[in-house]
Image (spheres, rainbow, N blue to C red):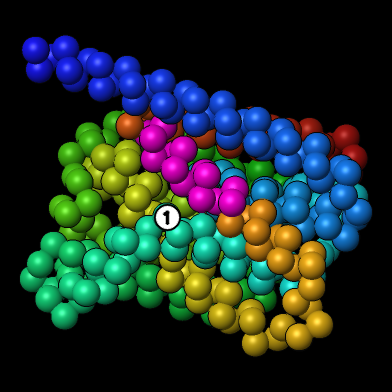
Amino acid sequence: MQQVVTTATVRLARRHFRVTLALAVLGILGAIVLTFLLPMSYRVPVTLGVVQGLSEFLPISSSAHLIIVPRLLGWPDPGLAFDVALHVGTLLAVLGYFWRDWLRFLRSAYHPSTADGRLFWCLVLATLPGGLVGIALDKLAEEQLRSLLLIAATSATLGVLLWLADRYAPPRKELDQVSWTDALLVGAAQALAIVPGVSRSGITICVARAREMTRETAARFSFLLSTPIIAGAAIFKLRDLQLRDLSGPFFAGVLSAALAGALTIGLLLRYLQRSGFGIFAAYRLALAVGLVLFVLLHG
């Protein structure tokens, strides 16, 4: 009887996932069509907001795609205000999805001996390397590390590493079993995400899987870890924002990034209950090949 109930539950979960995925695909296609009907002042922030929301949480590198897409479409750099809008949008996405978790962690912060309290301080520890490197090298990354060939190399390398970690590391650890060493190593890896093509979620999930976290735990820990980093980046850039920058296109970028990001988080966590990261490793390798061909053909 229990087996029948379990089988029915699995089938229901799969059906729910397929329906959600179909609706998501239709929504994305609708958003693409809608963007081409919008004036250019809204088309750019909405399109790149969707790109940011998808690629920030999938292990495929948001910074790389935000360099690639405008170049392919011939769009100019949208500027600082748009950069802030994307960070605010993805921050809203991750907070909207994990606010209950963060509320529980914050309540347990004064009790580090508990599972939630220890996880809170593990996330604090893991945030430090990426935060310090981001503050020190943010300008260098924005001005110097934007080569398409560099993105191709980092995308392919991380794709192979992600596949190896997911293929050979046994999935043993759940979220309440994450250790201080796990947190420190994942946090140190997150600092490498300042290089376009590496991917913050990609490198943290890769190391988390190498540390034998389950697929869903690796993604969940990566997403929780993204919260303070994204919040810090948004606050750091807000200091240069002017009141006139808070326009319709700004809020369109925030909204599109937030909606795409929240949808991506939910779909990926459901997907990882059934499948692995091989599809993302393959995508990264295909992207690398495409970028090399594009550079060879267009110089």
Residue 46 vertical position relative to residue 210 in the rendered view, above or below: below
Q: Secondary structure at mark 1?
A: helix
Q: Residue at the location (8% across, 71% down)? A: 113
Residue in view at x 13 percent, y 62 percent: 115
**267 part of magenta stretch:** yes
Residue 145: percent from the left, percent from the top?
68, 62
In the figure, 239 relative to 27: above or below?
Answer: below
Q: Is residue 12 left or right of residue 49?
A: left
Q: Identify residue type, mark 1.
A: Tyr
Is residue 72 at least partly visible in the picture? no
Residue 299 is drawn in which quadrant?
top right
Q: Position of residue 111 (x, y in %)?
A: 12, 76
Specify the segment rendered in magenta. 259-272
Give x and y (percent) for residue 194: 56, 64
Q: Nearer the viewer, residue 286 or 279?
A: 279
x then y, percent, for residue 66: 71, 54
Residue at 22%, 15% (x, y): give it.
Answer: 7
Task: Please state, as top left, top right, bottom left or bottom right, where the N terminus lies in the image.
Answer: top left
Q: Residue at x 87, y 42 (%)?
A: 36
Left or right? Give the position of 112 relative to 10.
left
Taking depth in this image into account, of 146 and 226 the one nearest to the observer is 226
Q: Is residue 180 left or right of residue 36?
A: left
